[in-house]
Amino acid sequence: APAFGQADLTNCERELIHLAGAVQPHGALLSLDAADLHVLQVSGNVATLLGMAPGALLQQPLGVLGGDVEACITRLRDADLREPVALQCRIGPDLQPFDAALHQVPGGPLVLELEPSAGAHAAVELQDLAPDVMAATLSAALQRFGAAPSVGVLADAVVEVVRNLTGYDRVVVYKFDPDGHGKVIAEARHPRLESLLGHHYPASDIPQRARALYLLNRVRMLVDVDAVQAPLMPALLPGPGAPLDMSMCQLRSMSPIHLQYLRNMGVTATLTASLVREGQLWGLIACHHYSPRYLRCTVRAAADLLAEVASTRISAIENYAHAQVALMVRRLEQRLVEATSTEGEWRYALFRNPRTLLQPLEATGAALFCEGEVLTTGEAPSTPELRALMAWVQEQPVAGDAPFACSSVGQANPALASLTPTASGVLAVRLSSRSPDWLMWFRKEQLQSVTWAGDPAKPMVASNPLELSPRRSFAAWSELVRGTAVPWSTTEVALARGIGVALVDIIVQVQAVRLLIAE
Ligand code: BLA
């Protein structure tokens, strides 16, 4: 894997971003021996921020910093330090106040990060809030999040609240699909900025390694994309001779490829918070500013709390939605049973109300193949196309009675390319082992329903980081998903199977009744 800063666009997926070996210059970092607190490593900016040169600190007891820093840390001896613990301390003969954070690398050194408290950031816009304002803002926000009935309403509340709290020029909620591609689903922005709402970006814009890191370290702040980074000295920790694992560091320098991306889009400062659902990265709250911007640790902690509460609310809303869908399917089954007993015909009952058939699976169309007949609803291919599709689906191997699911029919079988607009995606359940009876749901190509950034007919795919931009990302995403539908989730496949099983039951009953009548 490429070392930090050595990645290019061919291998950036594997860049070792947690071994950045440098901090952003608005704070100083000290690695400390966990046993006796002597200084193992310092960032190159300690002279500027702490008033002591690296040589005067390295290999010295922490006490040489003066003030109460050593006492503060000793007090945390028994604390859980896997995640950074915030503390206030004073340093030097004039007792300068610092916002500090302490954590321990598992099996490794303690890491002390020090940021001068308010007032030391002359060149940078600073966001700080009085405790009573903060408390009022947070409690209003928590109430609002808790009352949000849908992910859309919640995301709109999140961007508004976070923008008010942090003052960034733009705040978006970015949601990942099952393939890891992202979409901007909510936005609050300075009125002069162009909107990014509805834009899509490819999964490759945020490497897997970064996503894994963002599950551990939930809030990242970049103060100034052009600031000169302060390298750790020495580069390798004495003893193990290994670079410091900076996964949990708040001051970690960000990947140069990502910084170039931000510069290309004119962004100077960012704050990003993870939205996590059931241990997976569901999305991000991403803030952009067009000049350097620094949030005090208290404001960052508030953003962390808001992201946490939003994450919890997302889980609740999505779990509820899943339960509703299961309920809809049960109602559909009931209606079919009723229709069969009163009218003797389940097929028309199934297609009478398209919403009940399409909505649970977020399908754009459906077709039933039964006893040589084809019934359709929603947007569906023509009957000859459907017969060709059925012949192909019939040949596809599936395990047992599992449904057949495909999100790119035209790519899987170029002879079916004409189906792409209406049925890029197909989810099919077999209704009989003896005759070719099938129920199929369709999804149209996802490009048919996107908001475009720029001219979609002019794809631009960069090979050079200097050309990275959201515009390029959007084009790259559209190339990737051309001819595909939004993939069917495992929940949807399971639902389709449930509906199929219910239908087979009903069909068997109807046949039994027919046989009885015939006798
Ligand atoms: C990280 N890329 C990121 C992050 C975002 C994006 C949101 C997370 C940053 C953070 O948490 O602080 C992508 N940002 C976007 C997009 C928009 C945006 C799409 O504002 C649109 C408006 N990036 C690339 C490519 C590579 C790449 C092609 O575009 C490499 C193949 C790398 N992105 C990359 C890396 C990181 C990243 C290495 C990690 C940065 C870090 O945490 O050090």
Image: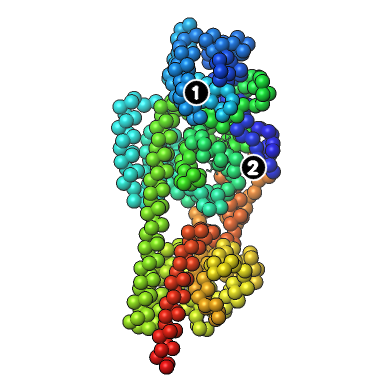
**Foreground tag (1 vs 2):** 1
| Residue 158 appears in the picture as rendered | yes
Q: Amino acid at mark 2?
A: Glu
Q: Is mark 2 within 8 Å of ligand 1?
A: yes
Ligand 1's image quarter is top right
Give coordinates of residue 175: x percent, y percent: 48, 48
Nearest the viewer among 162 and 38 is 38
Element under label 1? Answer: strand
Point 42% across, 30% down: residue = 301
| Residue 224 appears in the picture as rendered | no
Label 1: few (<14), some (14–19) or many (≥20) C-alpha neighbours in 10 Å:
many
Nearest the viewer among 505 and 253 is 505
**Mark number, residue 124:** none
Determine the residue located farthest toward the bottom in the rendered image. Answer: 519
Give coordinates of residue 107: x percent, y percent: 58, 27
Give coordinates of residue 430: x percent, y percent: 53, 73
Nearest the viewer among 268 and 509 is 509
Q: Which residue is mark 1?
A: 102
Quarter of the image with the N terminus is: top right
Element under label 2? Answer: helix
Q: Which residue is mark 2?
A: 13
